[in-house]
Image (tube, rainbow, N blue to C red):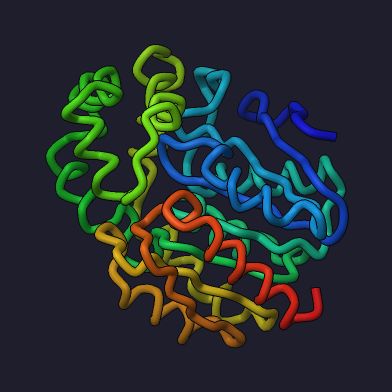
C-alpha cells in the first residue's frame, strides 16, 4: 500500500504507507506536507513500515470541511483516527515543528498505541507558537493579514525569508510544492489560519504530565543551527521524558530531514536498534 485516503471527522486525510516491519508514524509542520520526511523515509523502508500523514496544515491536497475543528487537540485526534483506521499499535511516533506539538498532545490523549517517541525541533512548553512566531500572532497575523501573507508566501522575497529561517538547503521545486497550494486555494488558507489561531501554549503545557509519565524510549533530535526553536527546549524535553536522549544534527537548521537526511535517518536507526525495535 502506498498513498491512501482515510476519512476523518474533518474531511479526508492522505497517508503514505511504505515498507514492512515495525511501524513509524511521521508528522510534519505548518505549511509543509508529508514530503518533508521523504528522504529520511527512503532510508528506512527496507526495515520499517513508514506511515507519513498529510496533516491539514496548509500544504495538504484537499481542504477540510468549512466547519472542521482544526484545534491542536482535534489535529491530534486525526492522528489517532489514522492509527485506528490502519490498526497500528506499538508505533514509533515522530514529529517535527507543529507536528511535534501534535505528537505531544496525541500522547497526552491516549498513549496506548505509542511505544516510542521521537521529537525533532518542535513547539513545546511555552513556545507554541515559537518565539519568532509569537509577535506575528500578537499583531493579528491570524486575521485578515494572514490571508494576504499566505496568498503571497510563494513569492520572493517572502518565500526566501520564510525558508531561510528554517532550512539551510534550498530546493525551489520542493518549496513551490509546499507553498503554492496555500497561496492558490482559499480552502487551504482557511485551514492554515485555523491552525495558526489554535496554536497556544496551554496545549503543549497541558501535555507535559504525559511526557513525564511516558516510560518508553524517546529520542530528541535538534538541528545544530536551529533559529526557530531554542536548544534549551530540547534539553528540557530530555529532562522531562524518563528514558530520553538528545542528539544534535550537524549542518542542519529546523528542518533536519531536508538539511541532513542521512544523519537524521542514521540517528533514528541507531535509536531503534538500541531500543530493540
Q: Indicate the quadrant containing the C terminus: top left, top right, bottom left or bottom right.
A: bottom right
- Residue 43 makes an appearance in the image: yes
Give the image quarter of residue 47. bottom right
* Of residues 212 and 252, the one drawn nearer to the viewer in this rendering: 252
Left or right for 131, reference 191: left
Expressed as whole percent of the image width and height from the top left, the position of residue 103 reads 57, 57
- Residue 58 makes an appearance in the image: no
Q: Residue at x 16, y 29 (%)?
A: 157
Q: Indicate the quadrant containing the N terminus: top left, top right, bottom left or bottom right.
A: top right
Q: Residue at x 66, y 75 (%)?
A: 270
Q: How many marks?
A: 0
Q: Residue at x 80, y 79 (%)?
A: 276
In the image, residue 30 above or below residue 60? below
Expressed as whole percent of the image width and height from the top left, the position of residue 202 reads 38, 60
* Of residues 204 and 38, the one drawn nearer to the viewer in this rendering: 38
Expressed as whole percent of the image width and height from the top left, the position of residue 20 reads 87, 52
Q: Residue at x 71, y 63 (%)?
A: 92
In the image, residue 178 above or below residue 95? above
Give the image quarter of residue 140. top left
Amino acid at each position: 500500500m502506498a498513498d491512501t485516503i482515510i476519512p476523518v471527522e474533518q474531511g479526508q486525510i492522505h497517508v503514505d504507507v511504505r515498507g514492512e516491519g515495525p511501524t513509524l508514524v511521521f508528522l510534519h509542520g505548518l505549511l509543509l506536507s508529508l514530503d518533508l520526511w521523504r528522504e529520511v523515509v527512503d532510508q528506512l523502508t527496507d526495515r520499517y513500515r513508514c506511515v507519513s500523514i498529510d496533516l491539514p496544515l496548509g500544504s495538504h491536497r484537499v481542504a477540510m470541511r468549512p466547519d472542521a475543528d482544526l484545534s491542536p487537540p482535534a489535529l491530534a485526534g486525526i492522528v489517532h483516527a489514522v492509527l485506528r483506521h490502519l490498526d497500528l499499535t506499538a508505533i514509533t511516533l515522530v514529529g517535527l515543528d507543529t507536528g511535534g506539538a501534535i505528537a505531544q498532545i496525541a500522547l497526552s490523549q491516549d498513549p496506548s498505541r505509542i511505544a516510542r517517541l521521537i521529537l525533532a525541533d518542535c513547539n513545546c512548553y511555552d513556545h507554541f507558537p515559537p518565539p519568532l512566531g509569537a509577535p506575528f500572532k500578537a499583531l493579528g497575523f491570524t486575521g485578515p493579514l494572514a490571508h494576504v501573507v499566505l496568498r503571497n508566501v510563494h513569492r520572493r522575497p517572502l518565500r526566501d525569508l520564510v525558508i531561510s529561517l528554517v532550512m539551510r538547503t534550498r530546493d525551489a521545486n520542493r518549496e513551490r510544492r509546499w507553498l503554492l497550494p496555500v497561496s492558490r486555494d482559499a480552502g487551504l488558507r482557511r485551514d492554515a489560519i485555523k491552525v495558526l489561531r489554535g496554536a497556544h501554549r496551554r496545549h503543549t503545557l497541558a501535555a507535559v504530565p504525559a511526557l513525564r509519565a511516558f516510560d518508553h524510549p524517546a529520542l530528541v533530535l535538534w538541528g545544530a543551527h536551529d533559529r526557530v526553536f531554542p536548544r534549551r527546549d530540547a534539553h528540557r524535553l530530555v529532562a522531562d521524558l524518563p528514558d530520553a536522549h538528545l542528539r544534535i544534527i550537524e549542518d542542519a537548521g529546523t528542518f533536519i530531514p531536508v538539511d541532513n537526511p542521512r544523519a537524521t535517518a542514521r540517528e533514528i536507526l541507531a535509536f531503534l536498534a538500541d531500543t530493540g525495535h
